[in-house]
Image: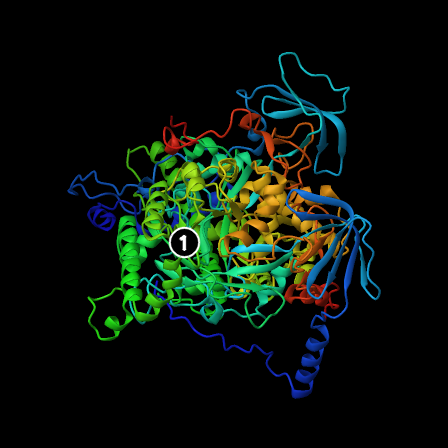
């Protein structure tokens, strides 16, 4: 189409003029305005020339791009403000802050979604606050799970609810867990009742690069935007080892670990080349825009009303949403989360990340992290693991209960994650088991260190540690009141505040999801 | 989902490249580590849960000849007894896991290391009935999960197969490396509901109908085996060995343990059990709490996992966290189980603790992993620390249901068990890292 237009244009600008104009535009781009005047026509126009007023337009390919408006990314500080949140004060409880500070008979005040006061009995309770008696009870930050498939593998379990693995090709970086997340999954309310206030919802591990994670404030909602954790940075799920081999081995590969890591490297090399093309296009387009602007300027000043022939904008490279995502990883804009069990495989991933120029935020499952904990600590890569899951497959054969403790002893950052709709309901118990195993192995750990495994450290893995994960004045009101010491099997969450709102209150019981209403005991059936 | 025929356990796992000398050493070490039963053992000054509801503080337990010979305050250790200081410790019977994959499942996702999960259909016969399969034939007493489970305070497991409509027969096995089971076959295991229906090639109702059909065939077979041999019987839907394996079930000599969740299926199972006069045990039982009075009346126990509180099953969504407590209050015998898991067997005491947090009394929680499983399977002399009981017991650092406690000493058949397993060896090796090159 554009070519056809160009051929019928009655060209009143000679080639030499055009070249001069182009050079002029290039100068414009480099040094701003100040280019010379239009060159004089070489020869006077013959009088019998037909009067065609067709001039090549400046065709802007941007007009063919999607026109949707991308909402401005919220700043993380948006997580700290919730005008709908009630004012709540818990008094007399033992407060474990996950900062190393422990307050006996403490008071914590929550207002408008944030912690506004924290201290002992002297802390004043604002007028009109709901005052909760915490005597004999414990307060901790809300628990955070770095690895959950709630919502993307919702209950009831059914093929209809399998929305967590786009297992159609090994790289689906474009996929987003948020699109698979069902915010009325009945499992969500049970996780909140376990004290969980935020989680990273991840695509499964069928693919090498499964797609974007979705950081949620743990509460049911009508739509995903209602439950997204405000301002949380983007994350990307990757997986090495057995799972991608098993899933893709019979449908085009990779079928071996050789293929797995070759494919990772190939994907990022492709992304780097793609990013290069995009940059080249951006530069060419900037020059084109400058020429167009200059031409408009000259056209406006042309005494004869004659216009300069336009040029089509440089053709943009085809948008590839997978490569867009990986290019963002290469720019350091995405927190990379890698499912990986074995120590030697984690080392492969670290080497590949160095080769391709990206950083890994954390390894998930990482049952052999203890074997390479020196490297992981040196690289500053977090380790998300279980207390005592092991042995369900060969790459999980060497898991030991001291894993989190040994990583911690080394100065690394460990978390206890669930990867399970059952386990997410008792992260505190899982941390307790890992704590006990570590102490038996002679690792010096205080309770606060184990609490950080399920609060402050996961907040860092998700990139939301500046607003949640610890109890400090000014932080988000993600808070749990426990019936007793949080590391006892008999203790249960009594009150869970999610961003200052009551997420769970044992006095009123579990809030059924839409799906459960009117059916069954939880749904309030007569 | 193709099924696998049961295979005998002929594995002799051996590290590659181990020379004869090293092997001889390893054997010698194994012999040295093998528990000796000879000397009497006295656990002195512990808090002893003789049985659920009967606790004695500052008590001494004497173990001799594989049995508990005395228990109480002021009991004097016999001469030559090995004395274990029980001060500040808690002694209970060893935990009994009523539905386990330990010994059957080494690595869940690896076929050759998994003899616990049979396919819904048998590869050879293409039918959902594997009644003749015996867990005994697959059990590996030296399997990797055995020692890890024992370190969690388990002393006996009911190793049970799963898969199909009828999965086969379980074996009761102590976790001391014993070559022979305590008893096998112990019980028949099967499933109804959606899983049973899928195995039966149809709906949940199809599973019930097929179960009745199999039981009816087995009854007919049992009444006249000769007719079967002459081929003078109508076509039967199960093979001869399957029909044979069902005879003790029909006699009521062994229980039929059925994994079943929906209220409708549980009621149907109760009707089948009544019609065929079976000893029924419900496993899982997501909606069993809704049938609590009927289960109590029929004296049908429930083996459950108290953490399973999610409405995961479309056919059985009425699940609640306090189901164990509701059942127990109605008078149903409640046992707690991982429901067939292997690597996670050591979480059994945590599950009992969760059940207590959910409303069971502490004694009911302990009973759920000791006396109740022993009673369900008729394992006489196990599950308590009473005088005369088989000395399967555990010395705990504290409350056995509490997460921070540990099993410090495990006795099976009166013998102190080794505390070494795959994981402790790994910890030893990596407690200090080698310097980086």
Q: Position of residue B47 (x, y in %)?
A: 75, 47
Q: Position of residue A212 (x, y in %)?
A: 46, 47
Q: Nearer the viewer, residue B431 or B283?
A: B283
Taking the spot 49% from the left edge, 32% from the top edge, the residue there is A219
Horizontal placement of A375 versus A147: left or right?
A: right
Q: Is residue A289 visible?
A: no
Relative to A258, say whether B380 is above or below: above
Taking the spot 68% from the left edge, 76% from the top edge, the residue there is B30
Q: Quadrant of the C terminus of chain B?
A: bottom right
Task: Provide the chain ID for the residue under circle 1.
Answer: A
Q: Secondary structure at mark 1?
A: loop
Label 1: few (<14), some (14–19) or many (≥20) C-alpha neighbours in 10 Å:
many
Q: Nearer the viewer, residue B9 or B311?
A: B9
Q: In the image as oriented, which residue stretches furthest toward the bottom?
A: B20
Relative to B214, say whether A49 is above or below: above
Horizontal placement of B219 versus B81: left or right?
A: left
Relative to B185, say whether B61 is above or below: above
Horizontal placement of A92 versus A265: left or right?
A: right
Q: Quadrant of the N terminus of chain B?
A: bottom left
Q: Position of residue B305 (x, y in %)?
A: 51, 47
Taking the spot 29% from the left edge, 54% from the top edge, the residue there is B212
Residue that badge 1 annotates: A172
């Amino acid at each position: 189409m554009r070519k056809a237009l160009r051929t019928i244009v009655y060209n009143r600008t000679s080639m030499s003029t055009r070249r001069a104009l182009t050079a002029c535009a290039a100068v414009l781009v480099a040094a701003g305005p100040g280019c010379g005047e239009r060159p004089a026509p070489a020869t006077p126009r013959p009088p019998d020339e037909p009067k065609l007023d067709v001039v090549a337009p400046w065709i802007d390919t941007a007009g063919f791009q999607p026109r949707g408006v991308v909402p401005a990314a919220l700043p993380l500080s948006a997580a700290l403000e919730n005008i709908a949140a009630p004012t709540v004060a818990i008094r007399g409880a033992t407060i474990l802050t996950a900062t190393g500070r422990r307050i006996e008979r403490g008071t914590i005040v929550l207002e408008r979604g944030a912690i506004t006061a924290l201290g002992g009995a002297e802390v004043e309770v604002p007028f009109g606050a709901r005052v909760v008696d915490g005597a004999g009870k414990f307060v901790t930050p809300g628990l955070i799970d770095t690895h959950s498939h709630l919502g993307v593998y919702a209950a009831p379990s059914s093929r209809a609810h399998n929305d967590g693995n786009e297992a159609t090709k090994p790289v689906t970086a474009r996929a987003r867990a948020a699109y698979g997340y069902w915010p009325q999954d009945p499992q969500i309310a049970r996780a909140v009742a376990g004290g969980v206030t935020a989680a990273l919802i991840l695509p499964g591990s069928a693919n090498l690069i499964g797609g974007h994670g979705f950081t949620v404030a743990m509460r049911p909602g009508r739509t995903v935007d209602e439950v997204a954790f405000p301002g949380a940075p983007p994350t990307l799920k990757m997986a090495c080892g057995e799972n991608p081999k098993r899933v893709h081995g019979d449908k085009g590969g990779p079928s071996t670990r050789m293929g797995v890591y070759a494919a990772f490297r190939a994907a990022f090399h492709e992304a780097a080349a793609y990013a290069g093309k995009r940059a080249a296009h951006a530069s060419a387009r900037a020059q084109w825009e400058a020429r167009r602007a200059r031409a408009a300027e000259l056209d406006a000043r042309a005494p004869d009303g004659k216009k300069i022939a336009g040029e089509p904008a440089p053709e943009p490279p085809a948008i590839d949403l997978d490569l867009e995502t990986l290019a963002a990883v290469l720019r350091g804009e995405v927190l990379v989360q890698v499912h990986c069990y074995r120590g030697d495989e984690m080392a492969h991933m670290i080497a590949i990340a160095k080769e391709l120029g990206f950083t890994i935020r954390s390894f998930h499952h990482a049952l052999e992290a203890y074997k390479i904990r020196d490297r992981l600590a040196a690289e500053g890569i977090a380790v998300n693991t279980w207390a005592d899951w092991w042995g369900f497959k060969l790459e999980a054969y060497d898991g030991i209960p001291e894993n989190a403790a040994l990583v911690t002893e080394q100065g690394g950052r460990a978390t206890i994650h669930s990867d399970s709709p059952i386990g997410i309901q008792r992260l505190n118990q899982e941390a307790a088991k890992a704590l006990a195993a570590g102490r038996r192995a002679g690792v010096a750990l205080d309770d606060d260190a184990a609490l950080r495994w399920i609060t402050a450290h996961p907040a860092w893995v998700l990139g939301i540690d500046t607003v949640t994960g610890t109890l400090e004045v000014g932080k988000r009101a993600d808070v749990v009141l426990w019936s007793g010491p949080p590391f006892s099997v008999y203790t249960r969450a009594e009150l869970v505040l999610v961003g200052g709102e009551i997420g769970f209150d044992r006095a009123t019981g579990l809030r059924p999801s839409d799906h459960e209403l009117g059916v069954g005991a939880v749904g309030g059936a007569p | 989902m193709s099924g696998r025929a049961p295979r005998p356990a002929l594995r002799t796992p051996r590290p590659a490249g181990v020379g004869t000398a090293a092997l001889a050493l390893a054997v010698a070490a194994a012999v040295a580590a093998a528990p000796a039963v000879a000397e009497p053992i006295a656990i002195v000054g512990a808090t002893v849960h003789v049985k659920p509801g009967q606790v004695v503080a500052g008590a001494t337990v004497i173990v001799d000849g594989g049995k508990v010979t005395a228990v109480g305050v002021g009991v004097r250790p016999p001469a030559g007894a090995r004395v274990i200081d029980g001060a500040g410790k808690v002694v209970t019977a060893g935990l009994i896991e009523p539905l386990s994959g330990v010994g059957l499942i080494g690595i869940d996702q690896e076929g050759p290391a998994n003899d616990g999960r049979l396919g819904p259909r048998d590869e050879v016969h293409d039918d959902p009935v594997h009644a003749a399969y015996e867990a005994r034939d697959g059990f590996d007493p030296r399997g990797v999960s055995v020692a890890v489970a024992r370190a969690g305070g388990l002393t006996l497991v009911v190793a049970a197969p799963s898969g199909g409509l009828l999965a086969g027969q379980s074996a009761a096995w102590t976790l001391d490396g014993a070559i022979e089971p305590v008893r096998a076959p112990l019980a028949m295991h099967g499933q109804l509901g959606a899983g049973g229906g899928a195995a039966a090639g149809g709906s949940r109702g199809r599973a019930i109908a097929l179960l009745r059909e199999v039981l009816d065939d087995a009854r007919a077979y049992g009444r006249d085996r000769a007719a079967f041999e002459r081929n003078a019987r109508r076509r039967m839907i199960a093979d001869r060995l399957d029909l044979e394996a069902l005879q003790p079930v029909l006699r009521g000599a062994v229980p039929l343990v059925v994994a079943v969740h929906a209220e409708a299926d549980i009621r149907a199972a109760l009707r089948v059990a009544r019609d065929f006069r079976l000893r029924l045990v419900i496993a899982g039982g997501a909606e069993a709490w809704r049938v609590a009075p009927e289960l109590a009346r029929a004296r049908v126990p429930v083996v459950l996992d108290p953490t399973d509180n999610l409405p995961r099953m479309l056919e059985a969504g009425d699940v609640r966290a306090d189901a164990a407590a509701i059942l127990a209050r109605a008078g149903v015998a409640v046992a707690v189980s991982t429901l067939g898991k292997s690597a996670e067997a050591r979480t059994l005491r945590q599950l009992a603790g969760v059940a207590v947090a959910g409303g069971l009394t502490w004694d009911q929680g302990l009973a759920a992993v000791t006396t109740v499983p022993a009673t369900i399977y008729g394992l006489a002399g196990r599950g308590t620390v009473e005088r005369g009981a088989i000395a399967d017991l555990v010395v705990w650092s504290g409350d056995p249901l509490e997460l921070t406690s540990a099993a410090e000493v495990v006795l099976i058949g009166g013998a102190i068990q080794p505390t070494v397993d795959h994981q402790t060896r790994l910890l030893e090796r990596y407690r200090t890292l080698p310097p980086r090159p």
